[in-house]
Image (cartoon, helix red, strand yellow):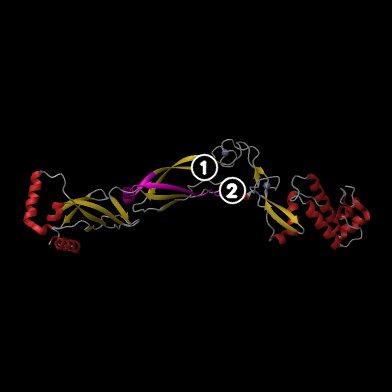
Amino acid sequence: MTECFYETLGVERGSDGATIKRAYRKLAMQYHPDRNPNDEAAEQRFKEISEAYDVLKDDQKRAAYDRYGHAAFANGHGGGAQARGFDTDSFSDIFDQFFGDMMGGGGGRGRGQSSARRGADLRFNLEISLESAFHGVTENIEVPTSVSCDDCSGTGAEEGSSPEMCPACQGAGKIRTAQGFFTVERTCPGCKGAGRVISSPCKSCHGMGRVEKTRQLSVKIPAGVEEGTRIRLAGEGEAGFRGGPAGDLYIFLSIRPHKVFEREGTTVYCGVPISMLTATLGGEIEVPTLGGGRAKVRIPEGTQTGRQFRLRNKGMPQINTPIYGDMIIEITVETPVNLTKAQKDTLRGLADELGDKHMPQSTGFFSKVKGLWDDLTD
Ligand SMILES: [Zn+2]
Ligand SMILES: [Zn+2]
């Protein structure tokens, strides 16, 4: 170290303290290791600058230096002064001390902490039958997702090795650059912000720490779910990135259309055909229910197509309650077909006996039609 401390800082011998401080700041920013990754020359230069400033900022040390030169600070530590030793950590201390307030606080370097990321939430569409929605069901599903790699325990590094600190950013994941007097932080391009780099990636997951896998899950679906009901399975989503927490899995339910029943909320609708004779004379019929059993319904005589009957508590359960909705059946009167000649003769006899009265009188529509017909035929 033959260079004069004043030359190192590029100042005149007689410069005042403020000038020396300004010169040091300028050079420190230029040669700071954060700004010169993997540059040993710059690091050496930074040490020299810091050492020079350490002496020249202190009046006593500066006086000793002016008198004895470098000899004052050689191995013997003459004059009681001691050149400061530097390690990488003190670099950041100096740096933060000078510039930290401009960046909104001391700003720890947070080595490698930004490498872990939460896994993504996943959506799984599941279609179930209306019966399953009625009773509740446990469905076994296969979810294609990524899970933490077993071979590297999710680190992404090959067995026996481990992720190393990114040399470009010293593990910070960010790089500071000075623009004029201001310092700008940006994501480290060397590790993309992870702070760590993997030199020998795990072969199973190619360094991602996760592998694609189909997982078997069993999902408990409560009775009464509806079209579009979502069920959240916490932590069953995509695995976290390099040790981060897993995302959630959302099951989106849809209900397969039923051949017989239609559902609206907790109400279930069902069309029921009855024979003309039952419709005419009345009787008792049995209708299927979603619960699996059959319900008896009394049909009054003279029942028309379109008439509805309400069956209490035979509808869908209301989710998470012991309450059931109603079932509504709508009657369709079937016209007899493929009658034998004898059966037709019987009906003709009935028609003769009833005369015009076989036309239904109960609705305004038919009365009106009959009236028109009578007008035309008269
Ligand atoms: Zn980096
Ligand atoms: Zn792996």
Cβ at disc 1 under 8 Å from ligand 2: no
Could you tell me residue 281's position as x and y percent? 12, 55
Percent position of residue 363, x then y: 18, 62
Front residue (pair 7, 264): 264
Q: Quadrant of residue 376?
A: bottom left
Closest to the observer, 11 or 66: 11
Q: Is residue 134 in the magenta section?
A: yes
Q: Which residue is mark 1?
A: 147
Q: Taking the image as four quarters, which one is ligand 2 found in?
A: top right
Measure the C-alpha gap from mark 1 to mark 2.
Answer: 14 Å
Magenta-span inclusion, residue 297 = no
Image height of 236 relative to 95, above or below: above
Image quarter of the C terminus: bottom left
Return the disc, 1 or 2, that comes first in the chain's sequence: 2
Mark 1 Cα-neighbour bin, 10 Å: few <14, some 14–19, many ≥20: many
Magenta region, residue range? 118-139
